[in-house]
Structure formats: C-alpha cells, structure tokens
Amino acid sequence: MNVAIDFAWDDRFLVGHPAMDDTHHEFVELVNAMLGAGEQNFAALLDAFASHVEAHFASEQTLMDRYAFPARDCHVDEHERVLASVREVRALVADGDVETGRELARALAGWFPGHTDYMDSALSTWITRKVADGAPVVLRRSMKHS
C-alpha cells in the first residue's frame, strides 16, 4: 500500500554548515522523489539515493574525523545502519520488491528530522566552535502559509 507522506524541504532541517545543508537538501529531494515514484522509476531513484547517501555520510565522517567530534562513533554507527538497510533494500528492489523500497523511503522520511536535529546539528555546532569559537547561525524562514 502506498501511503503519501509529506516530506519536502523545510528550513527546520538547516544546521548552519553550508555544505551539510546543501547535502541535506539533496537528501530530502531524493527521498521525496522515491516517495512519489512509479514502479518503473523506483529502482533508478533508489540507486541515485544510494550513491548520494554513501557520499553524504562519507563527507560527514571526514568532518567528524578532521574536527575530532566526540560523538563520532555513535554518529557513524547510525550512518552504517542506514547504509546497511539501503544495500539490503536495493537487492530486494532489484528482484522486483518495490513496496519494500517504498517502506524504506517512508522510514528515511521519518528518521531524517531527528537525526538532523540531534546528530547533525551537534556536529555543525562542534565544527563552528572549533573553527570560529562560536555557534552556527541558522536563519530559518517559516514554510507555513497563512
């Protein structure tokens, strides 16, 4: 059963690190595309997402290593669990199980906001303290329409 989920970019996902914010924007776009994909497009979108998330998580791990982020191991472990799920689901989708791919996309849409709020924002704050002895500045505009 395909249940529609409202998962679009929202400034609440901003963490104040431009490279991370750009990557997060792409993450949301790709997950949103998978949520709305037809049977024929899904495998290709999942492949594009898999390539994105590998690079996304590697980039964050490089930042964690460079700036000796104290919560590195916990953050990397969470990334590894997501990557393992993506790899497993890619194999199932390749065998025709698109519904499990859709379940993954819904799970990612549910996982991402919390991960960004807690893990990625902490990494951004840590980097800013190390580089500029301050906190990141995040300007969020309201995405709600009156």
Image: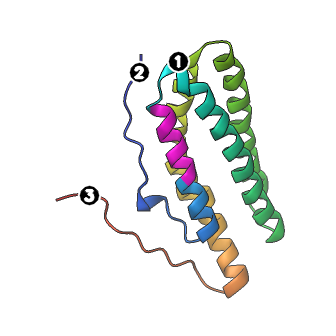
| Amino acid carrying mark 1 in the image | Glu
The kind of secondary structure element at disc 2 is loop
Indicate which disc residue 99 carries: 1
Check the picture and name the quadrant holding the C terminus.
Answer: bottom left
**Residue linked to disc 2:** 2
The residue located at (74%, 50%) in the rendering is: 55
The residue located at (73%, 80%) in the rendering is: 130
**Residue linked to disc 3:** 144
Are circles 3 and 1 on residues that touch, CB within 8 Å? no
Magenta part mainly helix, strand or loop? helix
Mark 2 or mark 1: whose residue is earlier in sequence:
2
**Residue 20 position within the rendered picture, expressed as x and y whole percent measured from the top left:** 62, 63
**Can you name the residue that lies furthest to the bottom here?**
133
**Residue 103 position within the rendered picture, expressed as x and y whole percent measured from the top left:** 52, 25
Mark 3 or mark 1: whose residue is earlier in sequence:
1
Query: Marks 3/1: CA distance?
Result: 31 Å
The residue located at (52%, 25%) in the rendering is: 102
- Tell me: 145 left or right of 118: left
Dot 1 crowding, Cα within 10 Å, few <14, some 14–19, many 20+: some
Dot 3 crowding, Cα within 10 Å, few <14, some 14–19, many 20+: few
The kind of secondary structure element at disc 1 is helix
| Amino acid carrying mark 2 in the image | Asn
Residue range (magenta): 26-35
Q: Nearer the viewer, residue 88 or 37?
A: 37
Q: Quadrant of residue 120?
A: bottom right
Are circles 2 and 1 on residues that touch, CB within 8 Å? yes
Mark 3 or mark 2: whose residue is earlier in sequence:
2
